[in-house]
Amino acid sequence: MSKTAIISAKDVDVFYGEKQALNKINLDIPENKVTSLIGPSGCGKSTFLRSINRMNDLVDICRVEGSITIKGQDIYAPEVDVVALRAKVGMVFQKPNPFPKSIYENVAYGPKIHGLAKSKTDMDELVEWSLIKAGLWKEVKDRLDQPGTGLSGGQQQRLCIARTIAVKPQVVLMDEPCSALDPIATAIIEELIDELRNNFTIVIVTHSMQQAARVSQRTAFFHLGELVESGATKSIFTSPEDERTQNYIMGRIG
Amino acid sequence: MANSDSATIDLVHSQRKKGYELFVMGVLILCSLVAVAVTVGIVLSLLFEAFRFFERIPLTEFLFGTQWSPQTALRADQVAAEGAFGAVPLITGTLLISFIAMCVATPLGLLSAIYLSEYASKRSRNLIKPALEILAGIPTVVYGFFAALTVAPLLRAGGESVGLDVSSESALAAGLVMGMMIIPLISSLSDDVINAVPQAMRDASLGMGATHSETIRKVVLPSAVPGIAGSLLLAASRAIGETMIVVMAAGLAANLTANPLEAVTTITAQIVALLTGDQEFDSAKTLSAFALGLVLFVTTLVLNVVALRIVRKYQEQYD
Amino acid sequence: MTDFITPSSQLKTRKSAEKRFQWYGRGAIIASLVFLVVMVGSILYKGSGAFTTTDVAIVVDLGPEAVDPANPQDARFEKIVKDALKARFPEATKRADRRKLYGLVSNDAGFELERFVLANPDKLGGEVRVWFRASDDFDILLKGTVDRTVDESERRLSDQEIGWIDTLLADGDVKRGFNWSFFTNGDSREPELAGILSALVGSALTLLVCFCFSFPVGILAAIYLEEFAPKNRFSDIIEVNINNLAAVPSIVFGLLGLSMLLNTFGMPRSSPLVGGLVLSLMTLPTIIIAARASLRAVPPSIREAALGMGASPVQATFHHVAPLALPGIMTGTIVGMAQALGETAPLLMIGMVAFIVDVPQSILEPATALPVQIFLWADAPERAFLEKTSAAIIVLLLFLITMNLLAIVLRRRFEKRF
């Protein structure tokens, strides 16, 4: 385990019923960096992402073996509370999914359930901080009481990011956060991701290799349930060691 | 700002109150067990009371006796001199009325369903379907009133004019009106079933030059038969358990007959007659109502279980 | 070469078979709808009369001889009314005639006069013209349901009675008006006085109990089954159970109520409490099935969003999923309540079939319900109860239509575009 790694996965196997989705994954994810997971559809990159905050628990037939540690703690240890875990490891989903409530309530929900704000002023500050961090404050500060579902797709996704960081997690997982957005909205989110890494460790699953190259410092390439190789983004894209990585980057696997 | 400086993070303790959540879970499970408790309650109370009844009246007499007259002792050797408890006339009466109802409702309900799912435009479908559903929403006491005070006198008058003696509480009146009541049940269930037949099968038949009605009769209906059978069973179960129409229109005369123009009585009508008004709870007369209730419950349950099985199998076939 | 244009004779037969088949379907629909229209139409036609009523004015002697101004409540009001009628039509001298004469007004005329006197003490001391409710036969004659041309022996009113009524009419002593008392009175043996208030209140109390039990239990059960129940045998049993319970004949629930609630737990017979509980057991499957459907319609992304930021499953459900499903659950509940409102058979089993004049004051007092009232009146021999029964049905149907419309509006209004 490298010294800077915040998350470290050891021999992780994931099964859906009889089917094995991930096979012996070993990966260290460094703190305050953006790590992107790439690979063709069905390669297991989203499955891996969802094992990091145990969203896979929701699937009855899903079974995880091996160990994933965050700051040295095994997150699959029996005494770990998934709720506490997810408060520390937030997630942004593929499709923007704001609650059908006001913008303010969307952001305030997490701090409320986790008891992070002591007073109304605290909460107001926290909501403002989160929205500023998510680059949405200027656009919505006059209409915080309006429904979050009324925003544009890109704004909705930034609202979801604000909602996630309002809980002040250590890690933010992003599952193809731009796949439902147009190029302009995508560019804004990518910039945002770059800024967020000062405060958070970010793991992002992406379909687009350009995006991985633009936003991430580290890249891991998954193929058919295996981690083929991982390393600094630049070296993965310029001098991949594995032939499969090479083929994928050249567009031969897709 | 967001990162704590501590080397480790706390994944074990969260803000949520676990005791409270366990309590909520317990309440949720308890609520869903109410449904089970109701079934158990029904079975237990029916079995218990019926058992006490069969202590006095032998099961064979109840199931095979052809005399039903719980009020008076007919023969001196009658057990406890409490009257005759042969349920056969009630069962035949129930079957007769349900049969009449099914004879009315099956063609009307089925043809309506076929027309609605195969021919009707979306607009008229959206109008006709709710209109038919109204029939299902009208309380049964209203059907009973209509059957007893409008249909029965009409049938009687009509019978007289052609020289037939129609009883003023005929099985026909109750059966006809009950049939109308279960039309929407058959039509909406069959509608679902017919809609579930894949369009590809219709296309194949139409593509060979069959007319629409030929396609329906030779392709759509045959493959929908199991589902339709299921819906008919559910409708029959509904007819057998229907109470108010028969209480008001079929009367209480326990005649063993297959003539729809005569008065017959049914299991449900007898239960109502036995349990309304003055009653001593321990008499065979009162307890017999629970024995009848048990017969009714078991019959409808078997019909439902079989019907649901058939429908589910059918749905899986096209999923 | 085959001719595609001119149809062969075989094709013609097939085409006409097609036409015929379509008409079978149309015929079936038309037959069902005609039945519906005839049934509802005949009830509307028969019941409309009950909403008007007839009053007749009679000059009564309220002098000090008849009513002591110091103790007006001690007067013999019934006799005063009878004397007034005798004075109006002195030609009735035979006992049988007198009885017919007294029958022009309702049996309760004495009480009506008492109420009038106690409310208007200033009118005492002389002759006063007072309006009395006319008897049901009188009322029916005016509504034209009695055929005057039928032979006297075959109708309920004799020529003499009709003569009196015509005299009263000619003198302007008869008025017709909206039958408010139908909504403000309880049941009565006299059709002209019978009203639905006690039955309406009984129904309302019963539904209240039904709602208070089945709504929370139904929602919570649905939430458990849809959101939390593990996929195992236990959940399967509950599921199958609910489906079968939905198809159990209503009268069986009545038997359960009689044997369990009344005889085992000793709850008060004929009370809205027991009636409501029995109906709630019946509506429970409806509510659970509807609630599960609307919970299922909430997109999983909402659940994921909440869980993904560390809400516990209970929090995610109660903060986000359940509120979104609520309109759908309400719709299902209203439909279930409408079913319960129209249900009769189980209430007969637990004794809510009594003759109730007074309005029930609590859920523990004996009461009846609107459909049971309809059942009781339908059995009454007086002709005038036929129109009362129909009128009560109209009121019941109006309530049901309102509830169903409410359900539809709710569904339209809150239909979420996820």
Image (tube, coloured by chain):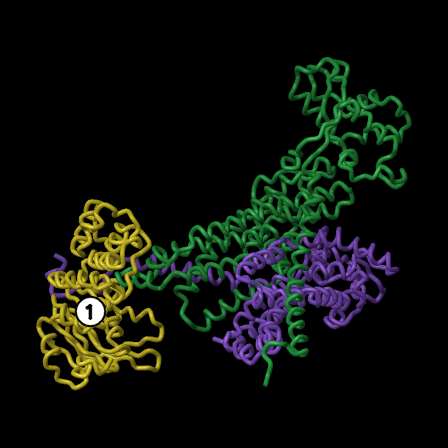
Chain colours: A yellow, B purple, C green
Identity of the amino acid at label 1? Answer: Ile
Q: Is residue C45 left or right of residue C234?
A: right
Residue at image point 85% right, 64% down? B76
Residue, x 60% and y 45% (percent of image)?
Answer: C398
Q: Is residue B57 visible?
A: no
**Quick one: which residue is furthest to the front in this view?**
C1
Secondary element type, mark 1: strand
Q: Position of residue C270 (x, y in %)?
A: 63, 48
Is residue B244 positioned above or below B56 on the image? above
Residue A160 higher or lower than C168, as above or below: below
> Mark 1 sits on what residue?
A204
Q: Quadrant of the C terminus of chain C?
A: bottom left
Question: In the picture, residue C298 is in which quadrant?
Answer: bottom left
Picture coordinates of residue C319, whole percent (x, y): 34, 55
Residue C276, given in percent of the width and then of the height, sits at 56, 50
Dividing the picture into quarters, in which one does residue A224 lie?
bottom left
Against C205, is C61 above or below?
above
